[in-house]
């Protein structure tokens, strides 16, 4: 019979909040995971998407807010699950306090890190789907692809290329032209 491996101790919210502010971590089921620093391509994509979303919401007079990382989202207290999505749209202002979003954002975009793509494609997909995120995009600069998951309508893993114009499903008429973003990173 194989020996049991020691299990890491779960972190509490109090312990999490005592960590240095510049810590680049996320917590899944009480276990801390380090995050890679973003690349220039990552930040370029993030900036373009942030501006597109913010401009659309302002133009429409919407009540949603757009936040880029680092901004905490507490999905669960027990076990503690805190993520820092690359980009998120939050429409329920009651979920926001001075520190974080408490509960699921409506829309999340993650930009895949070459060092750990499984984190966005598997782990975060699982958590975002099961904790009530309405829509989740996985933007992969290496593959030049965008995978759209519209959980609200059970539409999963719809693939697009960086040549596509993609509809943001939580909005009636917001489309993002990825060819414009692709031109900036080539």
Image (cartoon, grey):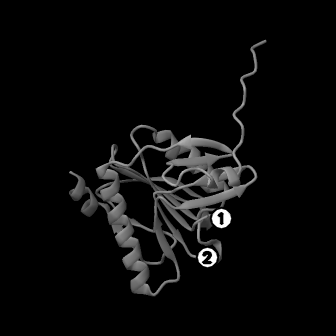
**Mark carried by residue 165:** none
Q: Which residue is mark 1?
A: 103
Q: How many marks?
A: 2
Front-most of residues 66 and 168: 66
At a point 39% along the width and 40% down the height, the residue shown is 114
Q: Is residue 183 above or below residue 66?
A: above
Give the structural element (helix, strand or loop) at label 2: loop
Disc 1 element: loop
The answer to which of 23 and 26 lies nearer the viewer is 23
**What is the residue that sits farthest to the bottom in this orientation?**
61
For label 1, the crowd category at 10 Å Cα-Cα, with few meaning under 14, some 14 to 19 and many 20 or more, is many
Quadrant location, the N terminus: top right
Q: In which image quadrant can residue 49 be found?
A: bottom left
Residue at the extreme top: 1
Q: Is 82 displayed left or right of 182 in the figure?
A: right
* Quadrant in which residue 95 is drawn: bottom right
In the picture, residue 17 is in which quadrant?
Answer: bottom right
The residue carrying mark 2 is: 92
Query: Which x, y percent locates residue 20?
Result: 54, 51
Residue 170 location (% of width, % of height): 52, 71
Please state the horizontal and vertical placement of residue 112, each as a whole percent of the image.
Answer: 42, 47
Q: Are marks 1 and 2 in contact (CB under 8 Å)?
A: yes
Q: Nearer the viewer, residue 65 or 109?
A: 65
Instruction: Tell me where residue 2 appears, x and y as whole percent.
Output: 75, 14
């Amino acid at each position: 019979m194989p020996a049991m491996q020691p299990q890491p101790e779960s972190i509490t919210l109090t312990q999490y909040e005592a960590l240095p502010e510049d810590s680049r971590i996320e917590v899944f089921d009480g276990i801390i995971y380090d995050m890679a620093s973003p690349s220039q391509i990552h930040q370029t994509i993030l900036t373009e998407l942030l501006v597109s979303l913010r401009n659309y919401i302002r133009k429409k007079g919407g009540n949603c807010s757009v936040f880029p990382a680092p901004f905490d989202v507490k999905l669960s207290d027990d076990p503690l699950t805190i993520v820092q999505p690359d980009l998120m749209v939050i429409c329920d202002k009651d979920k926001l306090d001075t520190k974080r979003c408490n509960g699921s954002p409506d829309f999340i975009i993650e930009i895949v890190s070459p060092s750990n793509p499984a984190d966005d494609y598997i782990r975060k997909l699982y958590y975002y789907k099961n904790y009530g995120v309405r829509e989740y995009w996985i933007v992969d600069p290496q593959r030049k692809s965008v995978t759209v998951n519209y959980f609200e309508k059970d539409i999963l893993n719809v693939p697009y290329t960086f040549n596509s114009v993609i509809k943001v499903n939580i909005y009636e008429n917001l489309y993002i032209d990825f060819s414009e973003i692709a031109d900036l990173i080539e």
